[in-house]
Image (cartoon, coloured by chain):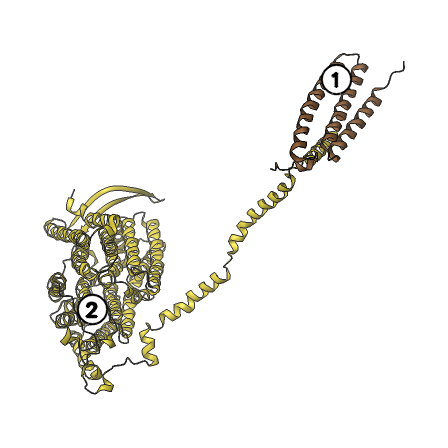
Chain colours: A yellow, B brown
Amino acid sequence: MNVLLASLPFYPLVSFIILIAFGKKLSWQLAATISVSSMAITALVSAMLLFELSSSPNQAMTVNLWHWFDLTSQIGNAEVNVRFYLDGLSAVMISVVTGVGFLIHLFAAIYMKADANFSRFMAYMNLFIVAMLILVLADNLVLLYLGWEGVGLCSFLLIGFWYQEKANVLAARKAFIVTRVGDTSMAIGLLLLFNTFGELNIEAVTTLAQQTNTLTSVTSDKVSDDIYWIALLLLGGAVGKSAQLPLQTWLPDAMAGPTPVSALIHAATMVTAGVYLIARLHDIFILAPQVMNYVAWLGALTLLLAGIAALAQTDIKRVLAYSTMSQIGYMMLALGAGAWSAGVFHLMTHAFFKALLFLTAGAVIFALHHQQDLFKMGGLLKKLPFESSLFIIGLICLMALPGTSGFFSKEAIIAELWSSNTAGPMLWWCAILGALLTSIYSCRLFFIGFLGNSRFIEKANPETSTLLRSALIVLALLSLSGGLIPPDLSSVFSTAMSEPLSASIEPPWLHTVAIITPFIGILFSWFYFKQYRISRSSGAEQNLQATEGRLVMFCRQGLGFDAFYNALLVKPYQWLAQKNKADIFDQIIMLNAWYVSLWHEALVLVQNGSLRWYIAAFGLAILLLLGVSFL
Amino acid sequence: MTTIPLFHVLILASLLFLIGFIGVVARKNTLFILMSLEVMLNAVGVAFIGAGSVWQQADGQVMFILILTLAAAEAAVGLALLIRMRKKYRSLDIDLLNKMQG
């Protein structure tokens, strides 16, 4: 029994219980120490686990905690255990969750210091880590689903953390409902999977899927049909959680939560759970190449749409939110193309640099007294040199300039697209276009916010605590050098390496184009966004206005998806609810009550307390009885 | 001595019983209700006596004495209650005593 692995989710759990039980009685020092140190222990333990894993013979470890329940079907029995399984893929995930999670906790402890509900905040953050660890360590899909719902709950709680404002509550509700659509699809997918294979244990399902793969000629149409639906439904779950088309609308609104939440949940970890799910069950997806093609297309479309929407945003956090969507689009594209390890690699590097970007943005917002509007910033490079330089590091990783971590992972994805069976040149061009968009919106963000005139009148006072800065610096170092430590996933995806068909021969200019694309974007923005970057002295032009053209507004509101869903789903639902205010089904049930009370009224009339009436009723009854007995 | 047929006795008894019953139901004055009750009891007594004499058995008369005792006891209790009611409500109207419902 591996104690380290077994105890991993319990450190944050203990911290969560302490914080939620004692709540406001704890001082800031105590609450911060408990939550951050529990995360530090978790990160330390997971580092030890990584070390142990690299020396273990079969590159995997399992530990069985307890038996949960049994599932029965016509095909057979399946045990559902609380059992943790650690292999290369979950190792990447736990290192991201605990490592980046620890740094974000450290940042959050200082960032949220002044909040009245500080311990509640840290408790939810800890609970999120627990749920996320259960998700990535789960050895069967039921336990994975538990973690999956757990992170959804924590996301809801943390988006709506400042629940006194209605907009935050609405955003939390929207995130919860929209992801629930995906989760329902995933639950149906799991049931169908159990019905088809009679197993929900991930290893067993993988083995069965591999067997099915080798026996392709034997499998009936029924099974391959089922697998197609399973893969599609699981994709639905992944799409909901990872904010991909068509369930992406919740992510930009989720930025209503505190910035550390955006960094931890909505950039680094939870939103990549969908990517993890598909990578984890890649053997099933291999059996359904058509669905893999859908995955690739969904990823590519999200990548482009989110990139376009990011071009028109004015809120610094919303730019980053759309950028997260588009980067997860890259991961989906990689998974769809069968570039499993490239996708997971990008997940890891993205977690580093996006957490850095969000936290730095948080530090900037903090320094500017909670100003999030880009057009009210400007010239921050001079005012906040420390934050700005870290932001630049984050942005060049996001743009994937050569040498940064983003470069290694994104190039790895793009390189595999052209000759993939389930992707192809079309999607390769989408990815290149996406890279161009990425560099353009990154430059626009930087030029508006950090160059040009300073449009922020009050004095900026950045948080200079060493702890906070060290967390940012570590993240920056990870972002820069994360590409040098590509995770070794060959044991996980060994069977999945689909040999590239030489249907299309790769032209020699592919890599050159991929590498120079970001530079084209930078060059383009250097001239196109000239008015943003140049400081002017004349008074009238000092205040920069966001353009409000029709097209810009359309892009700013997420390309009309919200309006579309509003018209298609929300409005009819509200109309129905309005019409059915009295609840017609309730009325049918209430008929019973009405019938009973009718009899009550009638019988009350009889019980009038008047003796003579009683006697008369008595006599009448005797007469009736006599009459009946005579007849 | 001419014998009275049982049928006639029973008709008399039922008429008396009916008159008594109507008195109980229709009268408002509690005193008259008690009196009507006596009439009803006596109607039953007549039926017992008649039946006893037809079958030449003493049981009918025994029953009548029982009923007579019952009637005396009932009258004693009833009259005592009547006095209490008179003191409390200054009236003998039975419809005043309708507080006990359900």
Amino acid type for the residue under numbered disc 1: Phe
Q: Are marks 2 and 1 on the same chain?
A: no
Callout 1 crowding tier (Cα within 10 Å): few <14, some 14–19, many ≥20: many
Q: Say whether residue A571 is left or right of residue A238.
A: right
Q: SS class of the residue under badge 1?
A: helix
Residue under the point 79% across and 30% down: B19
- Residue B64 is tagged as 1
Q: Amino acid at mark 2?
A: Ala
**Depth check, front residue: A592 or A339:** A592
Q: Is residue A626 visible?
A: no
User: What's the CA distance linking mark 2 and mark 1?
Assistant: 109 Å
Q: Residue furthest right?
A: B1
Q: Position of residue A90 (x, y in %)?
A: 19, 54
Q: Chain of mark 2?
A: A
Callout 1: chain: B
The label shown at residue A361 is: 2
Packing grade of label 2 (10 A; few <14, some 14-19, many >=20) is many
> Which corner quadrant holds the C terminus of chain B?
top right
Q: Is residue A300 above or below residue A205?
A: below
- The quadrant where residue A181 appears: bottom left
In this rendering, the answer to whether A177 lies above or below A207 is: below
Q: Nearer the viewer, residue A262 or B43?
A: B43
Q: Report helix, strand or loop for mark 2.
A: helix
